[in-house]
Amino acid sequence: MKDSSHNVKKIRYEYRAKNTLAVFFPDEFGHLEKSEKPDWIDSTNNIGVEVVRVLDSDCLEERRSFSKKFAGKSKLMLSPKLKVQLSKYNGRTYTARELGISDADVIVSHCHTVLVNVDMILSAINRKIKLLGDYENFDRTYLYVLCDTNISCAEIGSIFISCHELQQKSEKKFRGIFIDDGVKMYRHDFCNGTTSERNLSDVAQQVFVRTEMEIKNV
């Protein structure tokens, strides 16, 4: 295995995904072993888990820029200079009042950034669905998606609806999908259409310690 920063990051995210599943669902995912295509397998229980990380530097830079300049500022009190800068962002800016979060007119979101994130996630999922035919067969194969930006409840709903449509076009299908945005982990079952969520803060320390201990031996 190549000793490069890219490989180390890839390994760390793969182990983080495996350990998150093992902590939340020990009976179901507590016996995964490292493999390739998919990344994790449990031959005894016929389970496979593929891990993918969604990262777009341009999108992240846009979010950082927007948050630094405008997030938390009153839309009505922006200086003429900032109003000109704000107009250069494609899409629409939303205040807390417009999104029903509070009665404040402070800027909290930008719809163009949200749309880009959804498109990135669906693109990554679609690529994995197309590659699934080349993977080892299991009764249940899951996709674990790691994101570097937070996802809203509305976004999650639209993502899972689109995933059903993408799966219909594929002969071989994932049994379910996990989306981990660093704050929450959403689980969706493609067979019964159910969705659940877990707070990652509840297990963050445990997952981190287990992951760092395990990758030392890789």
Image: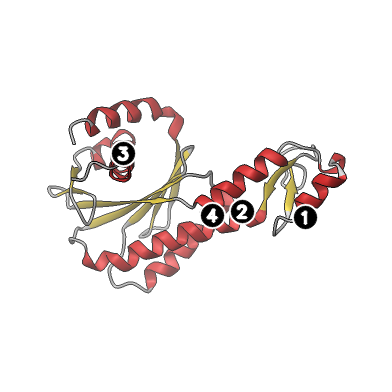
Mark 1 neighbour class, 10 Å CA radius: few under 14, some 14 to 19, many 20 or more: few
Q: Secondary structure at mark 4?
A: helix
Q: Which residue is mark 1?
A: 87
Going by the image, does 80 lie left or right of 25?
Answer: right
Going by the image, does 10 lie left or right of 54?
Answer: left
Q: Amino acid at mark 1?
A: Ser
Of callouts 2 and 1, the N-terminal one: 1
Q: Distance between the Cα atoms at labels 4 and 2?
A: 6 Å
Q: Amino acid at mark 4?
A: Asn
Establish if 62 lies above or below 215: below
Q: Secondary structure at mark 3?
A: helix
Q: Secondary structure at mark 2?
A: helix
- Give the percent coordinates (x, y) of residue 110: 68, 51
For the point 66% across and 41% down, which residue is it? 67
Of callouts 4 and 1, the N-terminal one: 1
- Give the percent coordinates (x, y) of residue 160: 47, 58
Of callouts 3 and 1, the N-terminal one: 3
- Give the percent coordinates (x, y) of residue 174: 31, 60
Of callouts 2 and 3, the N-terminal one: 3
Q: Distance between the Cα atoms at labels 4 and 1?
A: 20 Å
Residue depth check, mark 4 versus mark 1: number of the one nearer the observer: 1
For the point 70% across and 59% down, which residue is it? 91
Q: Residue 12 shows which numbered tag? A: 3
Q: Secondary structure at mark 1?
A: helix
Q: Which residue is mark 4?
A: 117
Please tell me which residue lies in front, 208 or 177: 208
Q: Amino acid at mark 3?
A: Arg
Whether the residues at callouts 4 and 3 have beta carbons within 8 Å, the answer is no
Q: Which residue is mark 2?
A: 113
Of callouts 4 and 3, the N-terminal one: 3
How many badges with numbers are in the image? Answer: 4
